[in-house]
Amino acid sequence: MGTGQGRGLFVGVLAGLLTVAGAASAQSPQLQRASVTGSITQGVPAQPPAREWSGEDGASGHPLMTASAIREAAANFDSCIAGMWPEAARRRISETSFVRFTADLTPDLRIMDLMDAQPEFTKAIWDYLDVLVNETRLARGRDMLARHRATFDAVEQAYGVDRYVIAAIWGIESNYSTMGGDRSVLRSTATLACVGRRQAYFREEFLSALEILHRGDLRPEQLRGSWAGAFGPTQFMPTSFKRFAVDFDGDGRRDVVDSVADLIASTANNLKKDGWQAGQTWGYEVEVPEGFNYLYADRARRLTLAQWQQLGLRRAGGKPFPRLTDQAFLLAPAGAQGPGFLMLGNFRAILRYNPAEAYALAIGHFADRLRGGEPFVQDWPRQERVLTRAERLELQQLLAQQGYYRGEPDGQLGGRTREALRHFQSSTGLPADGFASAEVLERLRGR
Ligand code: CA
């Protein structure tokens, strides 16, 4: 499986100043959630106004994304859908349901443009956090926590997952059920299962969507969402619905769209199964000392909080760490000029929900604020300019020419680019923080 296109869009929105993990090797089915978050980030409805497919080759250059390949696959759409009947039958979907739900399906080719979108301008992490973690959304979150207190009590009891994190996911994914995509999930996943560069992945999503409809957990008009198939206020993919959705209000349907009890409990169940540890937090803002070796800021390098203290890191705001034996990795999403964060195991559970570090940080911080916590203590380097797509490509090309980077320049500053950047930075005496600033680009040009 290649890069998730939902995530691809998200990376496009965030790339540049963000640390988005492992962009080149994304495999999680949860990736698709990112597309909705990305759109919300930009402050526009999760779906653009209905438009026709551009009819152009996809920017990814993938052979299945050329205009002619898309036309050919679209012409074959009906037989592609019919060809999935044996697999549907194996999943105990009745012929009546299969015919009923697939009879009027047509491909939505506009999705091909969205799948290969490569935005020129991106958002810095501080802008992203400003948009997502704001007073209006927090006030609504507190209101929801009060209004659904009994449900949150029961869910916390049953799953051991912090109510504030669930409330944060609900708030950030859909602004408490008030924002969301309006595309038919069945049509989107059918399109992606038969057209374009990720058909095998989306066959599974399409068949899972059919299973949901056949069993009657959700009605077709409820199963609406992002172009990449995520639906409901906490953005389940059809396959993640199958794994995690629960009927918490006991009406016999797992309604993660309109039942608050079901959606809260299903989201908690998802985090629990992804490794959430009850009674622990996600991480701490930390002050990193001047001259710190940022090669330590690596997800693979987990040390105890006591060891981090020995390296000179301090919890921001002067409070002590509650448990010095907890293991954490250091994240410096805006490099040496911005705040550091020591991330515990629960941060990884949030990353499994959505693999973008900026997203997981927004969730963790939003949860802390709902709990009564303060804004971050340290400032972001807001004077830093976000690199354009052309500059990001140039940065990668220069890193490649100088022997630091081996991948194909793609304009998305993923893990491998950051590693290359760190090695270049340490060779020039700059902090090896992997942060793609305009200054680093200047230095590369000057070589
Ligand atoms: Ca239910």
Image: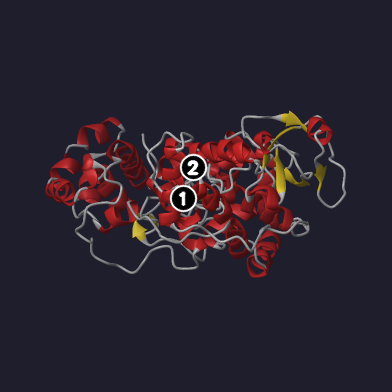
The image shows residue 237 at horizontal and vertical percentages of: 43, 45
Q: Quadrant of the N terminus?
A: top left
- Sequence-wise first label, 2 or 1: 1
Give x and y (percent) for residue 25. 44, 35
Q: Amino acid at mark 1?
A: Val
Q: Position of residue 2 (x, y in %)?
A: 36, 37
- What is the x, y in percent for residue 289? 79, 44
SS for dot 1 = helix
Outermost residue, front direction? 447
Specify the label residue 414 is tagged with: 2
Queried on whether the Cβ of the residue with tag 1 lies below 8 angstroms from ligand 1, the answer reads no
Q: Is residue 302 visible?
A: yes
Residue type, numbered disc 2: Gly
The residue that mark 1 highlights is: 11
- Residue drawn at x 39%, y 45% is 410
Identified at 44% across, 44% down, the residue is 398
Marks 2 and 1 in Cβ contact (< 8 Å): yes
Viewed as shown, does residue 72 lie left or right of 313? left
Residue at 57% x, 53% y is 437
